[in-house]
Amino acid sequence: MTKTGTLAPFDGDVAEERFSELFDRYKQHLAWVGVVIILAGVGVWFYLRSESIKSQRAEAAYEAAVQSVSSGNLPLAQSDLKKAAVRYAGTNGGTESSMALAKIYYQQGKYQDGISALTDPASKKGDLQYEARLLTASGYEGLNKWPEAAKEYEAAADVARFDADKASARAMAARAYQAAGNKAAATKIWTDLLADPKSTFATEAKIRLGELEAAPIKT
């Protein structure tokens, strides 16, 4: 009899038998788990492959539309860019198509149409969202809608990946707020930029703050 407080001798045959019994009991469940893992892996691979193909096609569609722009065939270019922007929304090629279409509209003075080309939420995500928001803001500037422009510039600053881009977007937001007569918002941004030792807008910030102090508040 095994003494209290001591371990029974290890019996390899018994352990192997017990493991075999457990395996036989759960082997069907283990098989299903394995199938699920394999199917999940295959699903992920197909998804990534599909997204890669979609991105490649989006870039190809964008490049084809750019060729139409270069040849001077703007009606065809606009049609191609619209199709690419809608079909490949969410990809870089789709966003590039939206931006190119907006620029064409801006050149024609159709700022609202250009802004509308960029209203798809997909164009405000991904790698090009900073550029897309700057372009949207410039459209609002073309319409003299300065508060809207300022908000887009601030949104661009929020998604900027580099400090220099963030500061640049914030400076543009401050100018837009100043043009809109929003002294408080403009003053706050210029004050922040002036206090930043790395800011390249410190000199402009000092000048703008002087202008704001001297100018009456617009109503």
Image: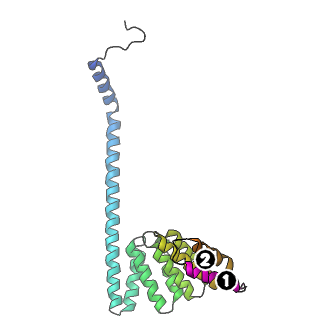
Q: Sequence-wise, which precedes: disc 1 or disc 2? A: 2
Label 1 SS: helix
| Extent of the magenta region | 199-218
Quadrant of the rendering where the N terminus is positioned: top left
Quadrant hosting residue 183: bottom right
Q: Is residue 121 left or right of residue 192?
A: left
Q: Which residue is drawn at 32% across and 92% down?
A: 71
For residue 14, which quarter of the picture? top left
Q: In this view, does 105 lie above or below 42?
A: below
Specify the amino acid type for callout 1.
Answer: Leu
Residue 92, compared with residue 36, is above or below; it is below
Magenta span main SS: helix
Mark 1: few, some, or many residues within 10 Å (few <14, many ≥20)? some
Q: Does the magenta stretch include residue 212?
A: yes
Q: Residue at x 37, y 75 (%)?
A: 93
Foreground pick, 150 / 62:
150
Q: Is any atom of residue 149 visible in this view?
A: no
Seen in the picture, residue 49 relative to 130 is either above or below; the reply is above
Which residue carries the number 2 mark?
A: 190
Q: Do the residues labelled 1 and 2 touch (CB within 8 Å)?
A: yes
Question: Which residue in the structure is indicated by mark 1?
Answer: 212
